Image (tube, grey):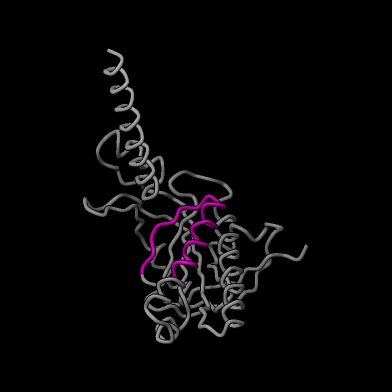
Amino acid sequence: MWSRLNYVRRSKEILQKEKDRSEELLLNILPKEIADELKEKGRVDAQNINSVAILFSDFKSFTQTAEKMSPQHLVEEINVCFKAFDLITEKYKIEKIKTIGDAYMAAGNLPNSDQHSTQNTVLAAMEMQEFIAKRKAENDTNGTPAFEMRIGIHSGPVVAGVVGVKKFQYDVWGDTVNTASRIESNGQPGKVNVSETVFNLLKDNDSFSFDYRGKINAKGKGDIKMYFVERKPV
């Protein structure tokens, strides 16, 4: 009887460990609220969300810089940067959406509303640029290739949901995403470039100062008012 009870206890412990491991893996792919919905219903309903701050980053002259690295060094360098970005997005409670090659995409105010999400998205972008600047200084000292990075942020409505069966992912769609990508591609290395929408949301925030760049022609979008944003000196 004792052996039987001991066997049952150990079996329950093993099952619980496997359940916890599966839970951890699922939460590494999906926001908790979305993971809970998927477990409960076996699917996730698409959401219309009125105001989401979309962040895009990518490395300037990535191909040319990558050609100076071995494949292993290239992957290691990207991994160092993206691991740092993951920690920064977690710190500011914004949601990492995905990486595409050398591009990193994240979103504030998703999946749940947060009045500080746009501010936190901008702060995260600034900290990402600070990390890249520090990393470049270290690599320059060591005589190894280093990346410089552009970041762009735009805020607006999106549709969010889970797509796929194998290697499924939580993703967002809409014109806001396309515009955020154009804001990023028209930025400058080391700067955080934002749209007029983001400016209007944060212009009264004492933490930031804005430098109006004028109307800039963005591919497929026409002229867009853009601003560089920085922290106000303390």
**Image quadrant in which you'd find residue 118:** bottom right
Outermost residue to the top: 1
Looking at the rendering, the stretch of residues picked out in magenta corresponds to 78-100
**Figure label count:** 0
- Residue drawn at the location 32% of the way across and 37% of the way down: 18
Which residue does the image show at 40% across and 40% down from the upper left?
A: 33
Q: Is residue 156 above or below residue 72?
A: above
User: Residue 68 in the image: x percent, y percent?
Assistant: 43, 87
Q: Position of residue 227 (x, y in %)?
A: 59, 72
Q: Nearer the viewer, residue 141 or 109?
A: 141
Quadrant location, the N terminus:
top left
Outermost left residue: 165
Check the image and report above or below for 11 versus 219.
above
Q: Is residue 75 magenta?
A: no
Q: Residue 167 versus residue 80: which sits nearer the camera? A: 80
Quadrant housing the C terminus: bottom right
Residue closer to the observer: 94 or 29: 29
112 and 202: which is toward the camera: 112
Which residue is rendered at x = 62% and y = 74% of the image?
Answer: 212
| Magenta segment main secondary structure | helix
Instruction: From the viewer's perspective, tell me whether residue 135 is left or right of residue 61.
Output: right
Q: Is residue 179 above or below residue 213?
A: above
When the figure is inspected, residue 152 is found, relative to residue 202, above or below; the finding is below
Q: Which residue corresponds to the image point at 43% horizontal and 46% vertical from the top-left?
A: 111
Residue 107: horizontal and vertical position, in percent?
46, 56
Instruction: State the image coordinates of residue 116 (x, y, percent, origin top left).
Output: 58, 49
